[in-house]
């Protein structure tokens, strides 16, 4: 399998893998320095291929881009360097999600149906409810890359009423925890627990029971052990379907 | 890192204009003027690639706008230790264009795009810089050193936005062969182009 997976560097660098295969290959990358090196070399090579297609865009595009940039908030440098948690507050970002900084991320979210059988293998076998959600006939899976190097997958089953959140690529935190929240359409949120992240950045899959009106998930950085209500802006947020 | 020096920039500006990497550093701190210069440096390559993949001018403009706004938003996430700024931007651009293609699976002239990926696009009326022309010739020369199957696999995936499964179908070749050809094709291109990452 190792040898075979390694040959995917080319297809991966060319964005020629399916979303599921990409996620799986990124898992492999976490443990394969030579693959990382090769993928970087291919990205540089691809940039050269791209440079051979130079074509000036229509002149009016410049003003449109600069205008959008002027009203687009920039990302914070990285999750671990987020400002200290501030006082508890409501969730204005949720209401204004469409205008918030992560709007481009939300637009970029591509809903994909993952290969559910294989997903089961990747998750902990003893987590039977998690396995049940993932293998449910009506399981709906949404994946996203909310930031460079971070992949998030949410699988939900309407008949079981459960949802599974998993992610990898998260930075290690010191004296702080990532906390998962479910977000409702009225702007309220409730905790789905603190994420357990291993050294390689893998998040142990979390099972949650979304209630009526739940429309998304979000992750914030909270003081160790988690908070009753979020105390910082989310480092990622995505809608859930089904 | 001296990679910034490799950025083709407008020589008509000042004697020693800042390179893309330096400009991204300014953009990361919210410098809109620096972003304007980043736009001028990278938009022709972004638009060229996106247009090559999507073909449709209106969609290409939309995606180009998305990519450039993404560069603004996430400039602080660019890490020079992980690659050149050009590779970072073009990775964003290629991914966005491919996402757009795949989100429209239902529609479409897949065959038309296959044909398009296969032929050299005539260069548009835009004044062609000498550096661009040299680069295109170098890339074409290097593509010529690949085997037929390597070249088709890389072209269809990169310029056509096809998945390797689709490429395998189009070329009537086994999946495993296509995966391997993409990799060894890229290795040969990388070495031919003198990429030193």
Image (tube, coloured by chain):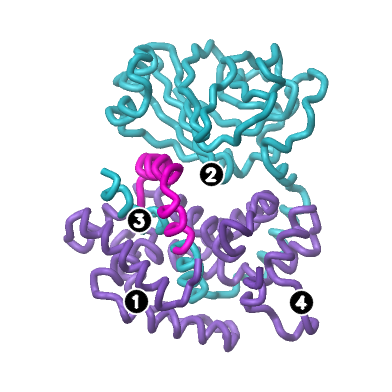
Chain colours: A cyan, B purple
Same chain, labels 4 and 1 = yes
Please, what secondary structure does the residue beneath circle 3 have? helix
Q: Is residue B108 above or below residue A186?
A: below
Dot 4 falls on which chain? Answer: B
The spot of residue A90 in percent (x, y) is 76, 19
State the extent of the magenta-drawn residues as a range: A16-41
> Mark 3 to mark 2: distance in Å?
17 Å
Dot 3 falls on which chain? Answer: A
For label 1, the residue is B119
Look at the image and tell me whether residue A159 can be seen.
Answer: no
Relative horizontal placement of residue A62, taking residue A153 as reference (left or right): right
| Mark 4 vs 1: CB contact within 8 A | no
Question: What residue is rendered at 21% in x and 54% in y?
Answer: B176
> Mark 1 to mark 3: distance in Å?
21 Å
For label 4, the residue is B17
Relative horizontal placement of residue A147, taking residue A207 as reference (left or right): right
The spot of residue B14 in percent (x, y) is 80, 82
Q: Nearer the viewer, mark 4 or mark 1?
A: 4
> Mark 2 to mark 4: distance in Å?
31 Å
Please, what secondary structure does the residue beneath circle 2 have? loop
Q: Residue A97 or A119: which is nearer the viewer?
A: A119
For label 2, the residue is A149
Dot 2 falls on which chain? Answer: A
In the rendered image, the quadrant that contains the C terminus of chain A is top left
Tell me which label, 3 or 2, sits earlier in the chain.
Answer: 3
Name of the residue lying farthest toward the bottom: B130
For label 3, the residue is A11
């Amino acid at each position: 399998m190792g040898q075979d997976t390694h040959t995917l560097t080319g297809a991966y660098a060319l964005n020629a893998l399916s979303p599921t295969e990409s996620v799986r290959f990124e898992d492999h990358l976490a443990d394969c320095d030579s693959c990382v090196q090769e993928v970087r070399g291919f990205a540089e090579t691809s940039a050269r291929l791209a440079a051979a297609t130079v074509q000036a865009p229509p002149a009016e595009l410049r003003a449109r881009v600069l205008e959008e940039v002027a009203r687009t908030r920039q990302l914070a440098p990285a999750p671990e360097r987020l400002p200290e948690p501030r006082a508890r507050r409501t969730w204005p970002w949720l209401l204004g999600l469409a205008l918030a900084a992560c709007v481009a991320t939300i637009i970029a979210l591509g809903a994909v149906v993952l290969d559910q059988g294989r997903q089961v293998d990747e998750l902990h076998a003893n987590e039977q409810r998690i396995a049940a959600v993932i293998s449910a006939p009506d399981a709906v899976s949404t994946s996203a890359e909310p930031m460079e190097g971070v992949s998030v997958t949410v699988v939900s089953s309407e008949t079981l009423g459960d949802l599974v959140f998993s992610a990898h690529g998260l930075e290690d935190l010191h004296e702080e925890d990532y906390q998962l929240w479910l977000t409702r359409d009225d702007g309220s949120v409730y905790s789905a627990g603190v994420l357990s992240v291993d050294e390689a950045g893998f998040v142990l899959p979390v099972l949650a029971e979304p209630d009526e009106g739940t429309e998304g998930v979000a992750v914030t950085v909270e003081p160790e052990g988690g908070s009753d209500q979020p105390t910082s802006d989310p480092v990622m947020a995505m809608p859930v379907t089904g | 890192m001296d990679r910034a020096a490799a950025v083709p920039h407008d020589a008509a500006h000042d004697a020693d204009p800042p390179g893309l990497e330096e400009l991204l550093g300014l953009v990361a701190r919210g410098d809109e003027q620096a972003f304007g210069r980043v736009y001028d440096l990278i938009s022709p390559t972004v638009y060229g690639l996106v247009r090559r993949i999507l073909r449709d001018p209106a969609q290409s403009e939309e995606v180009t706008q998305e990519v450039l706004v993404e560069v603004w938003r996430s400039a602080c996430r660019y890490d020079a230790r992980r690659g050149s700024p050009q590779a970072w931007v073009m990775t964003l651009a290629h991914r966005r264009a491919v996402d757009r293609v795949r989100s429209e699976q239902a529609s479409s002239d897949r065959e038309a795009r296959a044909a398009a990926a296969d032929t050299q696009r005539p260069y548009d009326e835009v004044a062609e810089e000498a550096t661009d022309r040299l680069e295109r010739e170098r890339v074409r020369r290097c593509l010529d050193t690949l085997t037929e199957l390597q070249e088709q696999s890389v072209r269809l995936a990169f310029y056509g936005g096809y998945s390797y499964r689709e490429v395998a179908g189009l070329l009537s070749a086994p999946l495993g062969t296509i995966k391997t050809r993409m990799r060894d094709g890229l290795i040969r291109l990388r070495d031919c182009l003198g990429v030193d990452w």
